Image (tube, helix red, strand yellow):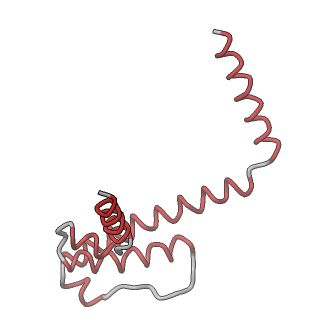
Amino acid sequence: MLRYGFALGVVLLLAGCQTTHEQMLNQGYPPAYADGFQDGCSSGRQAAAMMAGDFRKNVPRYLQDRQYESGWDDGFRQCQAMQRSEEQREYHERFWDDRDREWQQEKDRDAARAYRRN
């Protein structure tokens, strides 16, 4: 039984190491869509972070292959939004004033006391 649990754990660990591209293919997405999503996602993260780097887009394929185009557009939008959200979260954590944090903690303690009384 222990051996089966270990094998299952290894399989789940390896599945977690799949790239998004591999996961999409395993879920039945067309290869062209997965290719476009991968390229668009990379470009979307770079655009959101305003990083210098390679903007990945196979323009001839984008213009001729509707699945690649759709995947690229979806990947760009989703990953750009995720990158922006992550940056906003990091900004908030880094620059949230200590006084605001202390005020929030005091407010939470007061609320907890009030709820305990009931």
- Which quarter of the rendering shows the C terminus? top right
Splitting the image into 4 quarters, where does residue 24 fall?
Answer: bottom left
Q: Residue at x 80, y 38 (%)?
A: 102
Q: Residue at x 36, y 80 (%)?
A: 39
Q: Residue furthest top?
A: 118
**Figure disc tally:** 0
- The answer to whether 115 appears left or right of 16 in the picture is right
Splitting the image into 4 quarters, where does residue 19 fall?
Answer: bottom left
- The answer to whether 108 appears left or right of 56 in the picture is right
Splitting the image into 4 quarters, where does residue 57 fall?
Answer: bottom left
Q: Residue at x 59, y 62 (%)?
A: 87
Residue 56 placement (x, y as % from top left) = 39, 85
Residue 72 placement (x, y as % from top left) = 31, 75
Instruction: Please state which of residues 12 and 43 is positioned toward the viewer in this rendering.
Output: 12
- The answer to whether 64 appears left or right of 40 in the picture is left
As displayed, is residue 53 above or below residue 77? below
Residue 62 placement (x, y as % from top left) = 26, 83
Instruction: Please state which of residues 10 and 107 is positioned toward the viewer in this rendering.
Output: 10
As displayed, is residue 5 above or below residue 14? above
Q: Residue furthest right?
A: 99
Q: Residue at x 69, y 22 (%)?
A: 111
Instruction: Please state which of residues 58 and 13 is positioned toward the viewer in this rendering.
Output: 13
- Which quarter of the rendering shows the N terminus? bottom left
